[in-house]
Image (spheres, helix red, strand yellow):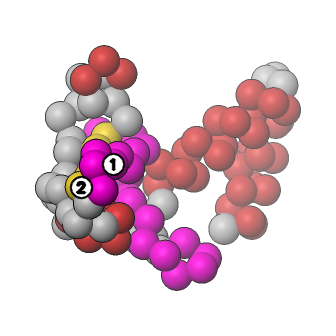
């Protein structure tokens, strides 16, 4: 992954854009194309939205209602990606990652 990141930074930096813009652009793209459903510690992580590819957000309501939805849902955009509720974060993330 770091080799991919450094290659992407090199390509983007060779354009006449500032390093700050290039780095932010490359990190956003790497986040969008990730397919892993676990992080480095083994915890479940939500995949990008299956409908539009945007980053997923975790939400909680009450003591045992969790769900994951697209960051472009509602006022932030026009995507309708939302997962089923779960009784804990892991179940909510698993429900989200099953969406197609």
Residue 90 drawn in magenta: no
Task: Report the predominant secondary structure element of the magenta stretch.
Answer: loop
Q: Nearer the viewer, residue 60 or 1?
A: 60
Query: Where is mark 2, residue-wise?
Result: 65
In the picture as drawn, the residue positioned furthest to the top comes out as 75
Q: Is residue 89 left or right of residue 67?
A: right
In magenta, the rendered stretch is 39-63
Q: Relative to 51, does residue 42 appear above or below in the rendering?
A: below
Mark 1 lies on a secondary structure that is strand
| Quadrant, the C terminus | bottom left
**Answer yes or no: do the residues labelled 1 and 2 have beta carbons within 8 Å?**
yes
Query: Where is mark 1, residue-wise?
Result: 60
Q: Relative to 50, does residue 20 appear above or below in the rendering?
A: above
x and y percentages locating residue 11 in the rendered image:
75, 43
Tell me if mark 1 has few (under 14), some (14-19) or many (20+) residues whose alpha carbon lies within 10 angstroms of its own: some
Q: Which residue does the image show at 84% across and 32% down from the upper left?
A: 19
- Looking at the image, is mark 1 or mark 2 earlier in the sequence? 1
Q: Is residue 41 left or right of residue 2?
A: left
Mark 2 lies on a secondary structure that is strand
x and y percentages locating residue 56 in the rendered image:
38, 47
Q: Relative to 44, does residue 47 appear above or below in the rendering?
A: above
Real-space Cα separation, disc 1 to disc 2, in angstroms: 6 Å
Q: Which residue does the image show at 55% across and 45% down from the upper left?
A: 29
Q: Nearer the viewer, residue 80 or 5?
A: 80
Q: Which mark is residue 7?
A: none
Q: Nearer the viewer, residue 50 or 75?
A: 75
x and y percentages locating residue 58 in the rendered image:
38, 50
Q: Is residue 96 visible?
A: no
Q: Quadrant of residue 55?
A: top left
Q: Nearer the viewer, residue 84 or 32?
A: 84
């Amino acid at each position: 992954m770091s080799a991919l990141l450094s290659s992407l930074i090199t390509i983007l930096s060779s354009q006449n854009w500032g390093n700050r813009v290039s780095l932010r652009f490359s990190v956003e793209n790497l986040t969008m194309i990730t397919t892993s459903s676990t992080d480095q510690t083994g915890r479940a992580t939500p995949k990008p939205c299956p409908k539009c590819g945007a980053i997923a957000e975790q939400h909680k309501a009450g003591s045992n209602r969790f769900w994951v939805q697209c960051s472009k849902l509602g006022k932030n955009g026009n995507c309708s990606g939302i997962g089923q509720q779960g009784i804990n974060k892991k179940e909510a993330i698993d429900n989200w990652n099953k969406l197609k």
